[in-house]
Image (cartoon, helix red, strand yellow):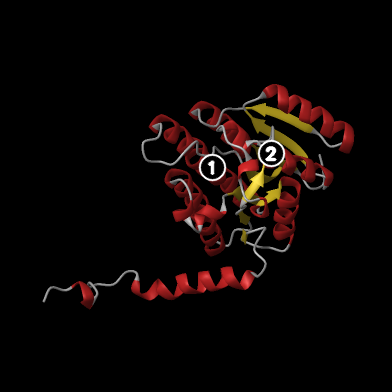
Amino acid sequence: MSTKGTALVTGASSGIGATYADRLARRGYDLILVARNQGRLEEAAARLRAETGVKVEVLPADLSVQADVETVERRLRADAAITLLVNNAGLGPKEGSLGSDIAYQDTMIAVNVTAVNRLAIAATDAFAAKGAGTVVNVASVVALIPEMFSATYAATKAFVLALTQSLQAETAKAGKAVKFQAVLPGLTRTEIFDRVGKSFDDLDQNMVMEVGEMVEAALTGLDQGELVTIPSLPDPADFNALNQARYALGPNLSRNHAADRYKAG
């Protein structure tokens, strides 16, 4: 077993997940690669074994299917070698939410929310029990500015951000040594647009980051101990100011009477 342990990466057959797998292998992690496409997983595993010498296992799973999610969950809970979960698998929107295919929206929620939640909590339980481990949840900058994107997709990514922040707070209060990171990429050049019939060529190229640069920045943020990493954000003080404004609301978010501005007369 690697001295760093094993990283389980979901959505590992392409894009951000495949890039995480590559970079983590080069950092010395053994790998468990999770995705629907077993053929692509096997190809990636063979390449990574040959190039890095780490152990790589494939675990085919469709994370829109409850039984498959439970298979991955059981592995997270039972395998003591796993020290890192990269909760990356996700579906992007085909269009805006209004008038869209509601069944596709349900599938998006299953992958982006239900599976992410179940796997994150399973990993957190396992890591808390053994006293160490890291959960990386890949969200999106649309979690911070939902008005700019498809409603359901933005809401799923806001869930991922809130889940990460709250799990970190819960484990810290309980004195558990589990590390968390939410990664909030902007537009990243992967296959996700191809899958929904769109092209990055139609976008402002000043807004599109190459996937290798995005993942390397995210891993640097993890090394630096960031709870939330926004790879394209130049000044972290801007995000810190947002958090300070949120915290300032705290004393007035739950009181025993309505604010005067809501009282009749």
- What is the three-letter code of the residue carrying label 1? Val
- Name the disc covering residue 116, or none: 1
Q: Quadrant of residue 217?
A: bottom right
Tell me where residue 81 appears, x and y as whole percent. 72, 41
- What is the three-letter code of the residue carrying label 2? Gly
At a point 51% along the width and 26% down the height, the residue shown is: 67
At a point 56% along the width and 32% down the height, the residue shown is: 197
Q: Is residue 133 visible?
A: no
Describe the element under mark 1 as helix, strand or loop: helix
Describe the element under mark 2 as helix, strand or loop: helix
At a point 44% along the width and 41% down the height, the residue shown is: 96
The N terminus - image quarter: top right
Tell me where residue 50 appears, x and y as whole percent. 88, 31
Q: Is residue 113 visible?
A: yes
At a point 67% along the width and 50% down the height, the residue shown is: 205
Viewer-proximal residue, 91 or 134? Answer: 91
Q: Quadrant of residue 73?
A: top right
Which residue is the site of mark 2? 15
Lower position in the chain sequence, tag 2 or tag 1: 2
Q: Label 2, label 1: how many angstroms apart (C-alpha)?
A: 18 Å
Residue 207 vertical position relative to residue 116 in the rendered view, above or below: below
Q: From the viewer's perspective, is 220 left or right of 48?
A: left
Tell me where residue 200 appears, x and y as whole percent. 64, 42
